[in-house]
Image: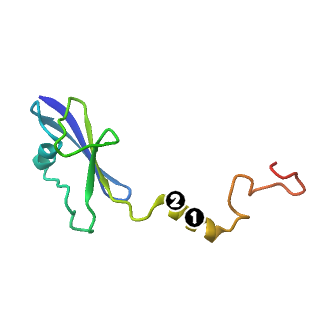
């Protein structure tokens, strides 16, 4: 028998974590089927899940080892780089950056 932990975040700021005992030679797909989770859509949104083990992408047919942490990832709605650019445009260049909060009459960068 091996011990694994299944983790997913169905919505922002919510995490579900389930410890699970499996037989040797079990795959990610078997572990998900055992608890009733699927890699298809979750019903609330039209998103699919991607699976990984300890932060590295893995196929559902991957064999699990004792102590593995199987994680399900939601698709990103917005590319993080695009979101950062849009926030910067909204803030303006004077209010963003490392040296935006300067003391009066000080040199640039201090």
Residue 8 position in % (x across, y down):
28, 50
CA–CA distance between discs 1 and 2?
6 Å
Q: Farthest residue in the right direction?
A: 105
**Residue nearest the observer in this picture, 43 or 75:** 75
Q: Quadrant of residue 48?
A: bottom left
Q: Which residue: 16% across, 48% down?
A: 32
Q: Which residue: 74% across, 53% down?
A: 99
**Residue nearest the observer in this picture, 81 or 38:** 81
Q: Circle 1: is it few (<14), some (14-19), or many (20+) Cα within 10 Å?
A: few
Residue 93 position in % (x across, y down):
70, 65
Question: Any mark on residue 81, and which?
Answer: 2
Residue 53 position in % (x across, y down):
28, 40
Marks 1/2 in contact by CB < 8 Å: the verdict is yes
Name the side, left or right, on which 27 lies relative to 95.
left
Helix, strand or loop status at disc 2: helix
The image's colouring method is rainbow
Q: Which residue: 26% across, 43% down?
A: 58
Q: Circle 2: is it few (<14), some (14-19), or many (20+) Cα within 10 Å?
A: few
Q: Which residue: 13% across, 53% down?
A: 36
Mark 1 highlights which residue?
85
On-image quarter of the N terminus: top left
Helix, strand or loop status at disc 1: helix
Q: Quadrant of residue 61?
A: top left
**Residue nearest the observer in this picture, 103 or 46:** 46
Residue 22 position in % (x across, y down):
12, 35
Question: Any mark on residue 45, and which?
Answer: none
Q: Is residue 30 above or below residue 37?
A: above
Q: Farthest residue in the bottom direction?
A: 90
Q: Quadrant of residue 68?
A: top left
């Amino acid at each position: 028998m091996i011990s694994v932990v299944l983790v997913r975040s169905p919505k922002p700021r919510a995490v579900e974590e389930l410890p699970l005992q499996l037989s040797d030679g079990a795959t990610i797909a078997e572990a998900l089927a055992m608890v009733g989770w699927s890699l298809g859509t979750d019903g609330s949104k039209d998103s699919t899940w991607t699976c990984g083990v300890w932060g590295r992408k893995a196929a559902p047919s991957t064999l699990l080892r004792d102590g593995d942490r199987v994680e399900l990832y939601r698709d990103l709605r917005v590319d993080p780089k695009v979101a950062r650019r849009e926030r910067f445009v909204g803030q303006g260049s004077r209010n963003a950056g490392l040296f935006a909060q300067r003391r009066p009459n000080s040199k640039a960068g201090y």
